[in-house]
């Protein structure tokens, strides 16, 4: 009787997981199709590809325009990661642990970039940045992307702070440590997986951002996403698929790294 119940529960779990698996496969399918299209021999994008070649990757790495856009995006993403991680971490500490007047309003304002359509933000930033000469400017991109990336850091760090035992911080304060010392030596080592995850999300939010970049890019200051938009309109070749595959690979590597580091941290705490 017990074996029948277990087999019935297993069948029910399989039937419940099947539609979820199909939905996930449908969501991942476009990304999977891009990879074979990036190694096809045809001079235009096609699926399934006929033949196998890596010349489109060679064209990407050998094209000075693509490389300039890539390095520009990397510089912006790295600067955004530092600024958004610092701002987001401090904001999360203030919102979770502090007694800030109007905390609910400030929290909603901090998370607003996740709710407001990016096209609205892009138009507003362009109208604000244009008179200041920040369109197509490195610093303008860092400011804009930091605004978009901070909410991700706030969410991940806030979750880590809520799981952290506040009594450890109080013990450090009772032992004579200042709040800054307690945060650096006690709080930060315990919430670093959340901070690191927020930093990864901030990097990806900047490097993969397209809508705002399309509006505030200039002739020289052009991100890789803006370059992709232009080539889709005027020069649609499998190089676009190659760039898309590289962006996907970078995202997967970063997310896998932070996941592995988080698991190792949890194992170290348990031991």
Image (tube, rainbow, N blue to C red):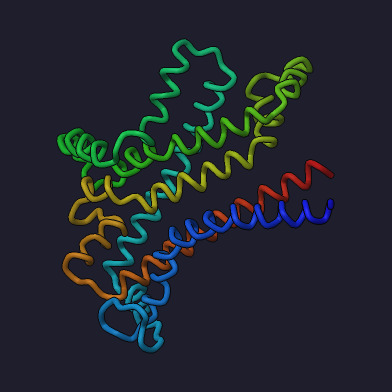
Name the image quarter holding residue 44.
bottom left
Give the total number of marks visible in the rendering: 0
Residue 86 screen position, x and y as percent: 50, 34
* 120 w.r.t. 60: above or below: above
Q: Position of residue 106 (x, y in %)?
A: 42, 20
Q: Residue furthest bottom?
A: 51
Left or right: residue 72 versus residue 90 is left
32 left or right of 20 in image: left
**x then y, percent, for residue 93:** 56, 25
The reply, left or right, for residue 37 in relation to residue 158 is left
The residue under the point 53% across, 27% down is 92
- Of residues 182 and 39, the one nearer the viewer is 39
Residue at (41, 30) in percent of width and height: 111
Q: Residue at x 18, y 55 (%)?
A: 219
In this rendered view, identify the residue nearer to me: 110 or 29. 29
The quarter of the rendered structure image containing the C terminus is top right
Compared with 197, 31 (above or below) is: below
Please state the horizontal and vertical placement of residue 36, each as a whole percent of the image.
41, 77
State the residue at coordinates (19%, 51%).
218
Vertical arrangement, residue 228 with respect to residue 84, above or below = below
| Residue that sits furthest to the front in the current view | 1
Left or right of 197? Residue 47 is: left
The answer to which quarter of the image holds residue 18 is bottom right
Residue 215's place in the image compared with 30, above or below, is above
């Amino acid at each position: 009787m017990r074996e029948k119940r277990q087999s019935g529960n297993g069948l029910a779990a399989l039937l419940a997981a099947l539609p979820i698996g199909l939905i996930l496969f449908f969501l991942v399918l476009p990304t999977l199709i891009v990879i074979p299209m990036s190694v096809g021999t045809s001079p235009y994008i096609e699926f399934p590809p006929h033949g196998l070649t890596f010349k489109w990757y060679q064209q990407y790495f050998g094209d000075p325009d693509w490389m300039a856009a890539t390095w520009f995006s990397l510089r912006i993403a790295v600067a955004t990661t530092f600024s958004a991680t610092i701002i987001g971490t401090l904001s999360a500490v203030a919102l979770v642990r502090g007694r800030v007047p109007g905390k609910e309003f400030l929290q909603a304002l901090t998370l607003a970039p996740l709710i407001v359509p990016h096209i609205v933000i892009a138009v507003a930033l362009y109208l604000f940045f244009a008179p200041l000469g920040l369109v197509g400017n490195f610093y303008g991109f860092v400011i804009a992307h930091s605004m978009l990336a901070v909410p991700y850091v706030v969410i991940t760090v806030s979750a880590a702070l809520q799981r952290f035992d506040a009594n450890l911080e109080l013990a450090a304060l009772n032992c004579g440590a200042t709040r800054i010392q307690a945060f650096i030596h006690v709080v930060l080592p315990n919430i670093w997986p959340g901070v690191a995850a927020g930093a990864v999300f901030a990097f990806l939010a900047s490097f993969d951002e397209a809508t705002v970049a399309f509006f505030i890019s200039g002739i020289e200051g052009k991100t890789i996403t803006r370059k992709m938009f232009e080539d889709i309109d005027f020069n649609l070749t499998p190089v676009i698929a190659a760039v898309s595959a590289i962006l996907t690979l970078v995202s997967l590597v970063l997310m896998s790294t932070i996941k592995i580091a988080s698991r190792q941290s949890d194992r170290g705490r348990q031991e």
